[in-house]
Image: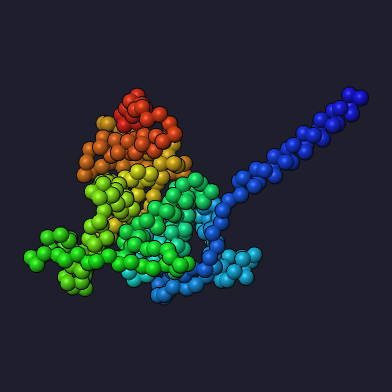
Amino acid sequence: MKDDVEMMLDELEQNLDAAAIGRRSDLTQVPELADYLKYMKPKKLAAFKGFKRAFFSFRDLHLTYHQSSADINGPPMGSFSLKGCEVTPDISVSQGKFHIKLLVPSAEGMVDFVLKCDTEHQYARWMAACRLASRGKSMADASYQQEVDSIKNLLKMQSAGNGRENGGGSQHQRRAQPVKLPNDFNVDEYVSSRYVRRARSKQALQQRISDAHSNVKSLTSTEAKLQYIRAWQALPEHGIHYFIIRFRNGKKSDLIGVASNRIVKLNMDNGESLKTWRYTNMKKWHVNWEIRHLKIQFEDEDIEFKPLSADCKVVHEFIGGYIFLSMRSKEQSQTLNEELFHKLTGGWI
């Protein structure tokens, strides 16, 4: 009798385990993007001057591409993880240009890769997936749809006529009345000289200012400020503070950028990203106050450098402050943990 009961309990436990596994597989199913895109490797193949078309799939943190969708079960033309990569937008809504520039870490160094999307909707989904993957998150993360919506809102703001209405099953684009600028309006007083030089003409630049102003003239003061903040936060270099440093045993100066989620080594001549170290891979960091050096230990390597353009205390406080902010969330109490803040920014971690 006892053996029969034990067998029944074992069988029941196995059935419950099987059901639980089935439910887990449904819950943990990772979303996937699959679409035809165009791509280019600017630096890898010198003779490769244009875009080529391929079938791309995106799952977890990996981007894979095949010649066509019919080859999806065969060996891919290429595949790489986007964790730790640099993602930069290269778009022009008026020209229908929706490019995603990727700088992917590899054994050979940083590899350039450009994705070309056909529509705003396609760009928003793929750009959001790439951004999350660079931070080590998949599309299953709750913030994916928020990222997509944020990108779509930014595209609307950049459109000359961003008012779109749905009616009768079709979309109609409504262009706001252009704003008449004062007769003595001088473009040079409002636009950086390097942008004036690159513009087709001052008249064309003035027209763009008029169109942009027409899109915000009906907003309230608060709405205009919020829109400005969102556009500012969406800029590729938002929140990055630059420092000239010298790595330990280095013979020349280097440029690094300290951002809210990473440290980036940059090319001093053109500002291109050369290498990225993310805080999520950081194990600890320490300041040597005697020689004014910062030593940071990551999962795969250690780096040590001396800031030249600022005191090491400033760089350290940026890193510690950003990490402190990343640990705060809306779900938790917003009471300031002063002890933790001083520990992260004090120099002894």
Q: Can residue 72 be seen in the rendering of this structure? A: yes
Query: With 52 as the anchor, is 95 left or right in this view?
Result: left
Rendering coords of residue 198 (x, y %) = 21, 69
Q: Nearer the viewer, residue 65 or 283?
A: 65
Residue 347: quadrant of the picture: top left
Direction left: furthest residue: 184
Direction right: furthest residue: 1
Q: Residue at x 43, y 43 (%)?
A: 301
Rendering coords of residue 140 (x, y %) = 54, 48
Q: Is residue 242 above or below residue 324?
A: below
How many numbered marks have been drawn onto this rendered protein structure?
0
Colour scheme in the image?
Answer: rainbow
Residue 302: quadrant of the picture: top left
Q: Residue at x 82, y 35 (%)?
A: 11
Q: Nearer the viewer, residue 102 or 97?
A: 97
Q: Residue at x 86, y 31 (%)?
A: 7
Query: With 303 as the anchor, is 62 left or right in this view?
Result: right
Residue 306: quadrant of the picture: top left
Q: Nearer the viewer, residue 179 or 257?
A: 179
Quarter containing the N terminus: top right
Q: Residue at x 80, y 34 (%)?
A: 12
Rendering coords of residue 104 (x, y %) = 44, 57
Quarter containing the C terminus: top left
